[in-house]
Amino acid sequence: EIVLTQSPGTLSLSPGERATLSCRASQSISDNYLAWYQQKPGQAPRLLIYGASNRATGIPDRFSGSGSGTDFSLTISRLEPEDFALYYCQQYGSSPLFTFGPGTKVDIK
Amino acid sequence: EVQLLDSGGGLVQPGGSLRLSCAASGFAFNTYAMSWVRQAPRKGLEWVSAINARGDNTYYADSVKGRFTISRDNSKNTLYLQMNSLRADDTAVYYCAKDLRGSYSNWGQGTPVTVSS
């Protein structure tokens, strides 16, 4: 069974700073089927990145994804006030079929 | 515009049943796989079940296998989740989600399910 680990658990930064979030898989993720989501309180998740590095429709270019195999990252180049939220990574294809990481909270320092 | 409207949640006693629905619009529903994802209070996201576009292949998380059944009616653009033998740890907000190459491009607003006596 594949397990996703996200680090850090909480990232405290100021607006304008760069944020780098990590997602590590317990085994290699095939075809880079790795996605990133943003979730704000009381809202459904929003897809940011799919296929490890492809921005979803309407996502600003300050969000970027990279990585392959077992190590992936999400970078927010310059934090805007609306970017302070929870972020989840998710894999597809390995048993169980879909798995989410535990999340990283980006909060205001 | 893609819209997914979740409904059917509520309060149910342990051992009871509920059927969730997800009404889809704004895209060719019959060409996309769909899933249910849940989120327990103050917890992370958990994939529950998936179904392919035609509805002839279904997949379940071990935690719900044998108790939940996913289905779809492509003539009505609607996704369903039949939940039987509900337990307290099934308490969560349930979201339907549209598949995009193994990720979820669109989500419903969520419908809350509470299992309690």
Image: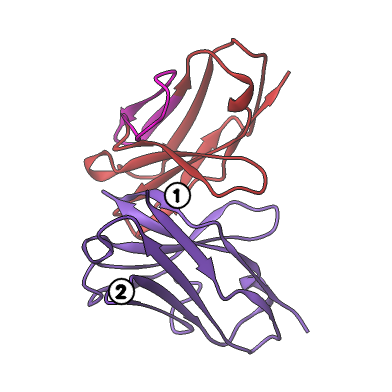
Chain colours: A red, B purple
Residue at x 21%, y 62% (from the top left corner): B31
Residue placed under numbered mark 1 in the picture: A3
Secondary structure at badge 1 equals loop
Q: Chain of mark 1?
A: A
Q: Estimate the x, y position of residue A4 in percent, counting from the top left.
A: 46, 44
Quarter of the image where one finds residue A69 = top left
A96, above or below A14, in the image: below
The answer to whether residue B18 is visible is yes
Mark pair 1, 2: CA separation = 22 Å
Quadrant for the C terminus of chain A, please: top right
The residue lying toward the viewer, choosing from B63 and B5, is B5
Residue at x 64%, y 21% (from the top left corner): A81
Confirm whether circles 1 and 2 share one chain: no
B32 lies left or right of A70: left
Q: Amino acid at mark 1?
A: Val
Secondary structure at badge 2 equals strand
B54, above or below A60, in the image: below
Residue placed under numbered mark 2 in the picture: B58
Residue at x 23%, y 66% (from the top left corner): B30
Closest to the camera, between mark 1 and mark 2, is 2
The answer to whether residue A1 is visible is no
Stretch of the chain drawn in magenta:
A53-74
Neighbours of disc 1 within 10 Å: few (<14), some (14-19), many (20+): some
Q: Estimate the x, y position of residue B83 in percent, counting from the top left.
A: 52, 81
Quarter of the image where one finds residue B35 = bottom left
A90 lies left or right of A12: left
Quarter of the image where one finds residue A85 = top right
Residue at x 66%, y 76% (from the top left corner): B10
